[in-house]
Image: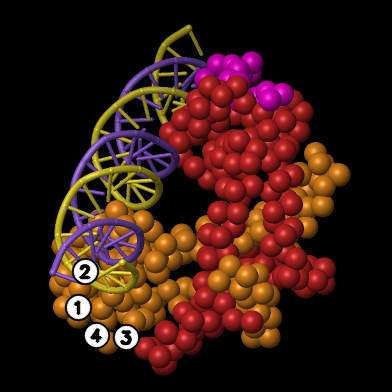
Chain colours: A red, B orange, C yellow, D purple
Amino acid sequence: MRDEVDDLVEAWGRERGDLDLAPVEVFSRISRLARHLDLARRDAFTAHGIESWEFDVLAALRRAGKPYELSPGRLLRETLVTSGTMTNRVDRLADRGLVQRLPDPHDRRGVLVRLTSEGKAAVDGAFEALLAAEADLLAELSDKERTRLAALLRSLLAPFS
Amino acid sequence: MRDEVDDLVEAWGRERGDLDLAPVEVFSRISRLARHLDLARRDAFTAHGIESWEFDVLAALRRAGKPYELSPGRLLRETLVTSGTMTNRVDRLADRGLVQRLPDPHDRRGVLVRLTSEGKAAVDGAFEALLAAEADLLAELSDKERTRLAALLRSLLAPFS
DNA sequence: TACCAGTATCTTGATGTCGAGACAACCCAG
DNA sequence: CTGGGTTGTCTCGACATCAAGATACTGGTA
């Protein structure tokens, strides 16, 4: 079974046969899979009326557990965006009624972003759809292969944490 | 060895123990690795005075082989951006003297984007730096593991092609 | 108590990308 | 050779994000 990256490596090999292209075999596939995955996510979410960036924020709140509250600062660290972006995102989510902004009782500078029940329903539905879509993409692999793949990826990811 | 995704899966497990989170173990790691990889690429390239988007375009031309020419249409398909974006990118690359725009002799609507010798030198240097940086990230894995990882990723990627 | 470095959030301006549309040239069917 | 659908490129307006700066509050120190 051949993929896009086999072509890519072949082309580089023709032009730069002097280089060891082994890293490309791994990282180029990771980048491309991430891109395809983004599109798959988008599709899964639009069926539930939310967008990827909305899911990222709502999911962070959902994972936090009751009462589904986090500060904007915590949210921007979880989702890896800047503070200006998070302000904008919370504004729009609040407009849609999926979250509400509350004053932090312990810090008057602070704000808490809380999931509404509509927000909770939206994120739960979207997450289930996402898992289903992702499970389809994994159909190629046996349980054993999937576990092995996850372990290998963990080895690469762990140094960044 | 534990990574960020172990925490993520644990948090979801607490809140949604009813769901099979196996897909998250794979795809969340792929997304995160892609993000870290983007940053590593940026670092490797800035040392060579070019940006990631510049590399994407220049590398496509470089891979094409002599005379290092491709149409904007071909370039936008290779790099997965829209035509408006590619026009903008070629403009800026031409301003920097890394590519030049030529009329397509076989199609008067068409244009050919050609790598200049400066562009070729820039992309070759940047690619070597990228491979070196990526090789570092792969240091965790043995040759056998790396090959296995590439094969598993190919299985996931192939259906998209 | 008064200060001040540090922290939390929001505001603002610049920028790169997208999507839709305009325009020119191509090419094939009639 | 003529018309019309298709293709290739560029233009333009909208928009999400980022980076830097503004503002307000906190918590420890003198």
- CA gap, disc 4 and disc 3: 6 Å
Reply above or below: B90 against B69.
above
Q: Position of residue A57 (x, y in %)?
A: 60, 37
- Give the residue at mark 2: B110
Chain of the residue that carries numbered disc 4 in the rendered image = B
Chain of the residue that carries numbered disc 1 in the rendered image = B
Dot 3 or dot 1, earlier in sequence: 3
Which residues lie in the magenta part?
Answer: A99-118
Chain of the residue that carries numbered disc 2 in the rendered image = B
Q: Is B73 placed left or right of B137 in the picture?
A: left
Identify the element where label 2 is drawn.
loop
In the image, which is nearer the foreground, mark 3 or mark 1? Answer: 1
Reply above or below: A74 against A27.
above
- The amino acid type found where label 1 is placed reads His
- The amino acid type found where label 4 is placed reads Pro
- Give the residue at mark 1: B106
For residue B65, the mark is 3
Identify the element where label 4 is drawn.
loop
Q: Position of residue A119 (x, y in %)?
A: 67, 28
Chain of the residue that carries numbered disc 3 in the rendered image = B
- The amino acid type found where label 3 is placed reads Gly
Q: Is A39 placed left or right of B81 in the picture?
A: right
The reply to whether discs 1 and 2 touch (Cβ–Cβ < 8 Å) is yes
The reply to whether discs 3 and 2 touch (Cβ–Cβ < 8 Å) is no
